[in-house]
Amino acid sequence: MAYLETHGLGRDFPGVTALDKVDLSIELGRTHILAGENGAGKSTLVKILTGTDRASRGKVLIDGRDPAEDPGLYKNVAYVPQELNLFPQMSVAENLFMPFSRTGHGGLLVDRGALVEEARTYLERFGIEADPRELVANISVSDQQLLQIARACTNASMKVLILDEPTSSLTRVEVDRVFKVIRGLLDRDHAIVFISHKMDEVFAIGDDYTVLRNGEKVESGRIADITEADLIRAMSGRDVAFEEHFRPKGPVTDAIMEVRGLSGARFQDVGFELRRGEILGFAGLVGAGRSEVMQTIFGFLKAKAGTVKVDGKPWTLNDTAASVDGGMLYLSEERKHHGIFPLLSLRENIGISILSLTKGAFGISSGREREAVQKIIDDYGIRTSGMGKRISQLSGGNQQKAIIGRAMATRPRVLIFDEPTKGIDIRTKTEIYRIMKGLAEEGVGVILVSSELDELKKCASRIVTMHHGRITGAFDTAETSNETLVGAIFGTEAKADAK
Ligand SMILES: Nc1ncnc2c1ncn2[C@@H]1O[C@H](COP(=O)(O)OP(=O)(O)OP(=O)(O)O)[C@@H](O)[C@H]1O
C-alpha cells in the first residue's frame, strides 16, 4: 500500500505551471525513481512533499492522512539535497545531530561525550571513515555526502528518504558505498525516492518509477518492465540519438596552451600541453587537485611557481580579469559561487558577458542584446517563462545551460569546463558534448574536468590523470583501457610526463 501519495497535484508560478495533475504513489520497502529532464518539476514536487512549498491544487497524503491538517506528518519525509549543505567548521558529530533539540540532544547543556558516542553508531552504519570529533572541513567529499544522508536518518520519524542526485561527485567505489547504505535502509522498512540523471544508477537501484515532463506525470510503473531507451523517450518525449563518442575528428596540431612546473594550493609541479583540435580531459578523485589547477591557471587561486603560455606568449597568472580579456573562460561546477548573479534576470546574466557583441557606439544596444540572449535561450533549450525571469528561479539544470550558453557566445580561445554536466539531463548532456566537440574542431582549446570516466571516454581525445595533487599520466583515450585509467586515478600506476 502506498505510504506517500499525491492526487492531482498542481503548482503555478507567475507565467509558468511547474506542476499539473501529478499522481504519485510511493510504497515502503521500495526505491522509487523520480525522473525528468531539467525543469520538469522534480524539485517543485519535492518541496511540496516535504512541506517547504504549498500546492496550488490537489493533495498530498502521508500514511493516509493530509499533512495540511497535521503538519507533524512532514517529519516522516526527509530530504537530502544534491549540494553539500553541512557546517564545515563544526565537528562530524555536531553536524549529525544539529539541530540538537530535534534529535533529543537539546536542553541547556549538550552532553558532548554522549553526542560523540551516538555519532559512532551512525558512522559505522553508514560506512563513514571519519572520527566524530573531526571537523567536517577535513573529511573527504564522499564521507560528507554520506554524512548528509546519515543526518537525515537521525530523524527518528523518517519513513521516506528523498535523495536528489546523491552521487554527483562520487567515484564508482563511493557510489557503491551509498547504494549499500540505501539498500540497508530499505531492509528497515523505509522508502527511498531517488532523483538521478544517471541511467546506470537508476537501473541498479530502482524498483518503481515516475516520469515527469513539463510538469505533468507522463508515465509510471516498475523499472523491471522498461528499458533505458523507453525511460529516456518518456522523459524527453522523443528519441535521443546517442553517438558512440564525441571526440573531435579534426587533426590535432600545435599547442594552444603550455603549462610548466605549476604549483599552487594542493598541487605540485603540474605540466601539460593543450593542443589545437583536441578536448583534453582531466580525471581524478574529488580532491585530487584538478579544479585547483584550473582555478590557478584562470587566476582565482594564487600560483606558487610555474609558467603558463597561450599561443606561445606568457600568460598573466593571478588575474581573472586578464584571463577573460585574453579569451580564457573557466566554467565552474559551483555555479552558485562563481557562475551566476542570482538576483539578476536571465537576460542580465547572459547580457553581462556578451557585452562586446552588443555594445554599439552609444552604449549597449538593447535590441541586439535581446536578440543575442534569445538565440542562446533557443540554441541551448533553456526552459524559462521569459528572459526577464530571475535566474535563481530557473531549475538547476537550466541555470547551468544559461552559463554554458553565455560562455560560448564570447568566442573564447581556451575554455575550461569543470564538471559541466553535473545535474544536467541526458538530452542536454548530449547537446553540450556536441558543442564542446564543435568548438574543439573550430580550434578553441577545450579542457574537460570530470568525475565521470564515461564522460571523459566519450569526449576527451587525451586524458590526464591526477592523484594527490600530482599528474600521474597522460593517455590517448582511444587506446587506453578503463583499468589503466583507474590505476592512474588511484595513483597505483605512475606514467610518463603529460606532454
Ligand atoms: N520560485 C519559482 N518561481 C518561478 N518559477 C519557478 C520557481 N521554482 C520553479 N520554477 C519553475 O518551475 C519549473 C520546474 O522547475 P523545477 O526546479 O521543479 O525542475 P526540476 O525538474 O527540479 O529541474 P532540474 O533537473 O534542472 O533541477 C521551471 O520552469 C522553473 O523555472
Image (tube, rainbow, N blue to C red):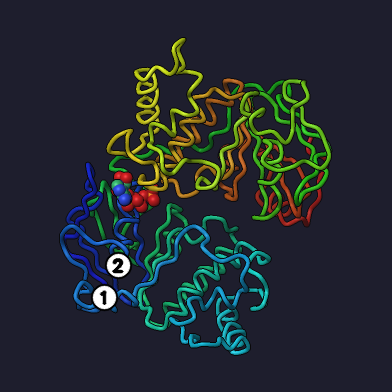
Quadrant that contains the C terminus: top right
Question: What residue is disc 1 on?
Answer: 71
- Percent across and percent down for residue 129 are 65, 74
Q: Is residue 44 left or right of residue 188?
A: left
Identify the secondary structure beneath mark 1: helix
| Circle 2: residue type | Gly
Identify the secondary structure beneath mark 2: loop
Quadrant that contains the N terminus: bottom left
- Percent across and percent down for residue 107 are 49, 88
Quarter location, residue 413: top right
Q: Is residue 114 left or right of residue 396?
A: right
For the residues labelled 2 and 1, say whether their Cβ atoms are less than 8 Å apart: yes
**Depth check, front residue: 261 or 432:** 261
| Circle 1: residue type | Pro
Question: What residue is disc 2 on?
Answer: 51
**Depth check, front residue: 178 or 41:** 41
